[in-house]
Amino acid sequence: MTAVSVIGAKDKTIELPEEIFGAKVNVPLIHQVVVAQQAAARQGTHATKTRGDVRGGGKKPYRQKGTGRARQGSLRAPQYAGGGVVHGPQPRSYAQRTPKKMKAAALRGALSDRLSHGRVQVVSSFVDGDVPRTKDALAVLASAVAPGAKILVVLHRDDELTWKSLRNVASVHILTEDQLNTYDVLASDHVVFTEQALTAFVDRAGSAKEAAK
């Protein structure tokens, strides 16, 4: 296990399990999972009209023979302005099948890569008391990461106080521990867990691994 200091708790460290934060970084696997995640986010509602969908064009433009011109059956044929589109995009789903084990392995690899570069931090809490305070939360982040970095903050689902404190900060992206995914880890410079969120994430990952056996 790798031990990291808990920011905001004096002389306290927390162990990060090797099977999650010390996994092998499989770049092709990570790439495949990220591409699948981005593809699944596409709406796929694009559409063009074929010659059968375009309004008009029922009348033959001119007679078949005797004009010296090429025969034409409709002014809505693709070669005419205002005609239908040939092989244009149609509504479709871009979703790719990605097994859960692949997603889990890619996430472990992404987290392991961030930790190997010292970009995984754990904080005890962002805000004291019962009132959201963005200033206090930013002060905790400033003590954890360098200014100007893109930060992924991972919270416990019940931590509404911290979410309200950081939700309007442009450089901070917030996820709950059960929403953590490979793309958002790679899109951020630093991953900052709350201690509560890290415990829940490790427990969830361990439970999923046992269930897969």
Image (tube, rainbow, N blue to C red):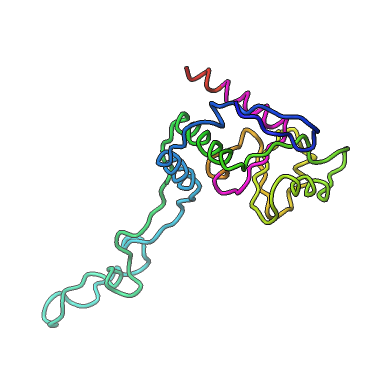
**Residue 70: image location, x then y, percent:** 15, 76
The answer to which image quadrant residue 157 occupies is top right
Magenta region, residue range: 186-207
Q: Nearer the viewer, residue 115 or 175?
A: 115
Does the magenta segment cover residue 205? Answer: yes
Q: Does 101 appear above or below 170?
A: above
**Residue 201: image location, x then y, percent:** 63, 29
x 57%, y 45%: residue: 184
Q: Nearer the viewer, residue 80 or 94?
A: 94
Q: On the rendered image, what quadrant is the N terminus found in? A: top right
x 76%, y 29%: residue: 12
Q: Nearer the viewer, residue 74 or 18?
A: 18
x 56%, y 32%: residue: 21
Q: Main secondary structure of the magenta part?
A: helix
Q: Is residue 60 left or right of residue 99?
A: left
Q: Nearer the viewer, residue 93 or 103?
A: 103
The answer to which image quadrant residue 175 occupies is top right
Q: Is residue 16 left or right of residue 57?
A: right
x 63%, y 42%: residue: 191
**Residue 81: image location, x then y, percent:** 33, 75
**Residue 110: image location, x then y, percent:** 52, 39
Does the magenta segment cover residue 132? Answer: no
